[in-house]
Image (tube, grey):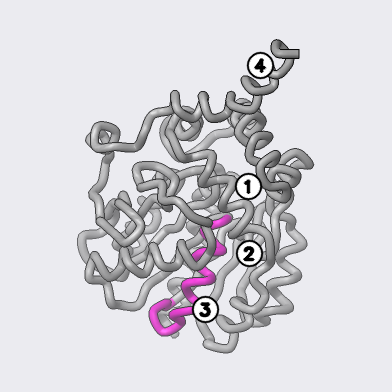
Amino acid sequence: MIWALAVLAGLALWPVIREARRTPVDDVVRASAPGEFADLSLGRVHYRWLGRPRGPVAICVHGLTTPSFVWEGLVPHLERMGFRVLLYDLYGRGYSSRPEGAQTPEMFTRQLSELLAALGLDEDLTLIGYSMGGVIASRFTAAYPGRVRQLMLVAPADMGIEVSRATRIARDVPVLGDWLFHMAFPRQFRASLARQQALEVSVEDLGDRQAGELMKRGYLRAVLSSLRHSLRRPLEQAHRQIAQAGVPVLAVWGDADETVPLAGLGLLAQWNRNAHQEVIPEATHLLPATHTEALAGHISALTESLRRG
């Protein structure tokens, strides 16, 4: 009986032990960061300015699991369009802090708003949101429509996402779900990265850098919290507010995306009849890195039409 209890206790504590072995995102780790840092109300945020030294500002908001480096292949295209590009890591990812508390759209909107204030940005913005970054960009736009010149959504999770049965249990069941997620997600994520190796991508060492996130303390907690609090419900109200405000919207979908269903295209059309939507053939959920040129073409087309308009 004692042996059995010891085994159960060991299993229960194993995620805690594994997490303690992961690398804390501290000053030592941040010394290798390619960008700069802003001290905000919930911690330090890593950001980078790329593209043109002057010009209209495009802010790229990354998704659930991959930090801001996912945009590196798109940046040269945005630069050619004349943009000054701001990349930043969401809380819990990359080199940014891992604050306690629920990772809600409101928290991420606050992060972006505070970052803009810290950088002294008060001009009209182009927001480009990928996957969960679409949720954040849309929430920000609904809250501050006068600040957004155009909203670009890339494989947006705003209309819902597909998750595995194990992930759904982890998301929906407290305590047990936490244990299950910390035990199962790393293997599931590595398996998806292995499948990804066959794809040609525009971001250098993308898979290795994605896998590196699993070794950072607080990353798994952040991903699970975001699944629970930012990716549970569609953003119908926010998109209706954006439509009412008249902010131009572009949504780009991949027809081979198994994470964000293409059915979301129809939902967005119901909520915002003026939204311009494009589908990239054979593109998976990784389309910012695999179909970068096609994505850039769609962004350029809307940008040029607004400049002429």
Q: Mark 4 points at which residue?
A: 6
Q: Which amino acid does label 2 sit on?
A: Asp
Q: Which residue is drawn at 39% across and 50% down?
A: 89
Q: Name the residue under label 3.
A: 142
Q: Is residue 266 left or right of residue 46?
A: right
Q: Which residue is drawn at 41% across and 84% down?
A: 146
Q: Crowdedness of circle 3 by 10 Å Cα count: few (<14), some, many (20+)?
A: many
Q: Residue at x 71, y 75 (%)?
A: 269
Along the viewing direction, whichever of 23 and 109 lies nearer the viewer: 23
Q: Which of marks 4 and 1 is in front?
A: 4
Between marks 1 and 2, how big is the CA–CA gap? 14 Å
Give yes or no for contact between labels 3 and 4 (Cβ–Cβ under 8 Å). Answer: no
Give yes or no for contact between labels 1 and 3 (Cβ–Cβ under 8 Å). Answer: no
Quadrant of the rendering where the N terminus is positioned = top right
Q: Name the residue under label 1.
A: 285
Kindly state the secondary structure of the residue where label 3 is placed: helix
Magenta-highlighted residues:
132-149
Among numbered discs 1 and 3, the one appearing first in the sequence: 3
Between marks 3 and 2, how big is the CA–CA gap? 13 Å
Among numbered discs 1 and 2, the one appearing first in the sequence: 2
Between marks 1 and 3, how big is the CA–CA gap? 25 Å
Q: Crowdedness of circle 2 by 10 Å Cα count: few (<14), some, many (20+)?
A: many
Between marks 3 and 4, how big is the CA–CA gap? 52 Å
x, y (%) of residue 230?
59, 59
